[in-house]
Amino acid sequence: MEKNFHSLPKNAKCTRCKKQAILRLPSHNAKFCRECFIHFFETAVIRAMKKIKVPKDTPIMVAVSGGKDSLVLWDILNRLGYKTKGIHIDLGIDEFSQKSIEAIEKFAKQRNLEWIKYDLKDFVGHSMVEIHKKIRRKICSFCGKLKRQLLDIATVAEGFKVVATGHNLDDEAGRLLGNLLGKRLQYVKKTYPYLPSPHPKIPAKIKPLYRLEIKEILIYAELNSIQPVEIDCPLSKGATSRKFKMALDLLEDQMPGIKRNFLFSYIEDNKPIDTFENYNECKICGYPTYLELCNLCNIKKQLSS
Amino acid sequence: MEKNFHSLPKNAKCTRCKKQAILRLPSHNAKFCRECFIHFFETAVIRAMKKIKVPKDTPIMVAVSGGKDSLVLWDILNRLGYKTKGIHIDLGIDEFSQKSIEAIEKFAKQRNLEWIKYDLKDFVGHSMVEIHKKIRRKICSFCGKLKRQLLDIATVAEGFKVVATGHNLDDEAGRLLGNLLGKRLQYVKKTYPYLPSPHPKIPAKIKPLYRLEIKEILIYAELNSIQPVEIDCPLSKGATSRKFKMALDLLEDQMPGIKRNFLFSYIEDNKPIDTFENYNECKICGYPTYLELCNLCNIKKQLSS
């Protein structure tokens, strides 16, 4: 971040208002003062919400991990007047989870925001650290599945129909690149910031930050004194998703703007998914699933055998 | 190259014959002795030629720049028994062109191979260095077009129906990545190592090295005492194609094999192009072109105006 944020000469002018600029966004070929950067950031989220087509008065459950993306998401949705509630899934990853919860508590208290915590352990009887020790393999995609099901359950249980996640432009472009390299074209077609509800027990999912780069989110966090958890998940080392982001960063450094043009060109030609496969009911708990068992019951079965 | 070629422990065994291995190919999860590496390399080209479906007795014009790819291509096609002739397009790029021609002369003399040289200057009245000075912009794609037309003209003039180029796996995967990132899906569909002749004046084009990585080509060159020109083209600095290759190298380092799986998965679903747009005749020289003027007449016109 420092490269963009601190190194401007004293006479650098804001691209929008011509006052003193404090930061530079190479991918937009722009320099901004504080106010115009906030305006730029708000505009990006407003444009995203237009694409997403969620009415302004729909209450939004915000999935809050405690990291920069989710706290910034929560902040900007409130700033833009959305009615929100935070939902945190406590995965039980030792110090990482504790510090995450502290960051959320502090953030929510300062802004007087409502939030709630669901514990993985209450649903499967084990923390993610315990699960990792037992199944001994790369856990990211696995953890993601459990987290998504718990988010769905919590969102519906709290009376919400929409859950927002903090996925940013880098996340989405990285995933798209991975799907293109692996020729998973069925997922390429699904690249979209809005996934309608496919079943009464599963909420719609939205990604209001999909137009914003990680660098821009870090700048917004700093300008608004948002203090996310500062340690990385200890179980996510070597996550494949990071590698695709690194490859895109290398290209972005040399061809500013390629990352956003890449992602947006694919989203532009896609539509929100409007046909869904038929769900089965999980044979143990009845929760909607494409398989025999839902993700939660599946892990419980694996752990008990 | 050194990393793969020189750093094996003394007791490392060849994956194929179990003798002492001298090199390691992480993307194939294999170690090879000299003989088994050559066998591996030949097999890759034999598989490519099967895909390409050029009969063994068809004489092949080999486009020879003097670089590692084209000299290795020429060597392996002769080793496999193809009847070949080398064609070099002298672009007139000062020391780079002189050294390239010296490398070809030496290589061909050692192996008693026939080759011929066509000069860009004879066709447009200017060397590439002179053209670069006049038009003052990035010249790679431009130079490529002129080179391709001259190759086509020379191949047909010399009585050949097929011209082979030294494009390797990295070239092809890099170009595919660039086309996917830019969402040029019409080019993605054309990713294939064989382009049939679309017009009597235009030969078929083949890429027999498309299954081989640049590292493997360098190893083959070293094992066979092939000495390519060692300087890079001074006009190609900052070529976009290099950036996509670098991004793929970064991914390949961490996920060995991803580059070949990526390229092959797209080629697997494609077919050689079998419908061609109708050609016009160049209004000046009558050469087949999709535009009003062919590339050579177009540059001559630009330079004279």
Image (cartoon, coloured by chain):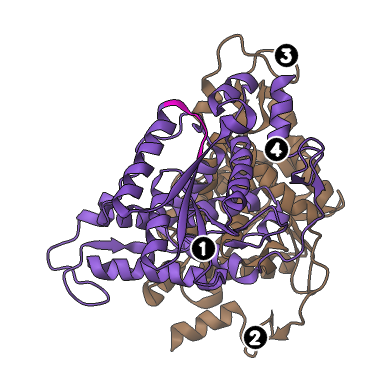
Chain colours: A purple, B brown
Circles 2, 4 touching at the beta carbon (< 8 Å): no
Distance between mark 1 and mark 3 Cα atoms: 66 Å
Residue placed furthest toward the left: A10
x, y percent for residue B142: 52, 70
Circles 1, 4 touching at the beta carbon (< 8 Å): no
Magenta segment range? A89-94
Q: Give me the disc on residue A59.
A: 1
Mark 2 = which residue?
A: B285
- For residue B289, side relative to residue A144 (left or right): right
Q: Identify residue type, mark 2.
A: Cys
x, y percent for residue B194: 76, 58
Instruction: Please state which of the two labelled residues, at mark 3 or mark 2, is closer to the viewer.
Output: 3
Q: Name the chain letter of the residue that bears numbered label 4.
A: A
Which quadrant of the figure has residue A133? top right
Q: Name the chain letter of the residue that bears numbered label 3.
A: B
Q: Are marks 4 and 3 on the same chain?
A: no
- For residue B244, side relative to residue B137 (left or right): right
Q: Identify residue type, mark 4.
A: Asn
Q: Identify residue type, mark 1.
A: Pro
Q: Give me the disc on residue B18.
A: 3
Q: Are marks 1 and 4 on the same chain?
A: yes
Instruction: Please state which of the two labelled residues, at mark 4 or mark 3, is closer to the viewer.
Output: 4
Residue at 67% in and 22% down = B32
Label 3 Cα neighbours within 10 Å, binned few <14 / some 14-19 / many ≥20: few
Q: Is residue B49 magenta?
A: no
